[in-house]
Amino acid sequence: MATNQKALEEREQQAVDYIKANANLSDLTVVEKIYQQLSRQGTFQTPIGLGFLQELETLLLPEEPVATPSESKPAVKMYTKEEVVAELKKAKAKQQKKVQILTVSTVILAIMVVVMLGISMTSKLPTVLNYKDMVTDEYASWETELRNREEEVRRREQELLEKESQYVESMDRQNQEQQTHYDTEDMDSLGEEDTGEDTEAENLGEE
């Protein structure tokens, strides 16, 4: 009987060492999954295994210090993937609207220049010529400003598209890595159960 107890303790110690070496116990999601699976299956029965379960339970229920008013910090809103994409689209729409307004303004100024040129061709008054020069200069200034702003808008749109693409790729990569991690843990857990059953069968054979 003492031999069986010792063998069981050794097997549970090996299982504990394996979990600590291969599982990311700093991730509470992983810890919770391991704890629930071990508790449900009744894998551990000796003080060694039960002590490890208690360690996992402690990790899942950490003691949080009570924050004083001076230490409390405002809650930070966490945005979902859909909310980030929506915000990026809103920013892009605003930039496009600004370009449209500048384009309409430029067209209006162009029409004014054409009108002034027509007036100058039919009139020799100095005041009309001066007004024509003033409008022409103003149009040139607006055209330069529009060109600069259009370049800035295109640059910002490209940055928004790159940020959106990087965020989506990052979210997909994290989901894939997490899924792969969970699948590996499930396979390792099944391997441990098979090893435990073989050991128990050998112990029974020895008896």
Image (cartoon, rainbow, N blue to C red):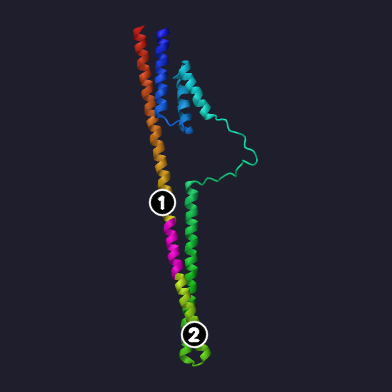
Name the quadrant of the N terminus. top left
Say whether residue 148 is magenta: yes
The amino acid marked with disc number 1 is Ser
On the image, the x and y values in percent for residue 114 come to 46, 82
Tags 1 and 2 in contact by the CB under 8 Å rule?
Answer: no
State the residue at coordinates (48%, 50%): 84
Say whether residue 89 is magenta: no
State the residue at coordinates (37%, 14%): 200
What is the magenta range?
Answer: 147-159
Tell me the residue that label 1 is attached to: 165
State the residue at coordinates (40%, 36%): 179
On the image, the x and y values in percent for residue 144 come to 45, 73
The amino acid marked with disc number 2 is Lys
- Disc number for residue 132: 2
Indicate whether 178 appears above or below 96.
Answer: above
| Number of marks in picture | 2
Q: How crowded is mark 1: few (under 14 residues within 10 Å), some or many (20 or more)?
A: few
- Disc number for residue 70: none
Q: Residues within 10 Å of mark 2 (few under 14, many from 20)?
A: many
Indicate whether 182 appears above or below 145.
Answer: above
Indicate whether 99 appears above or below 172.
Answer: below
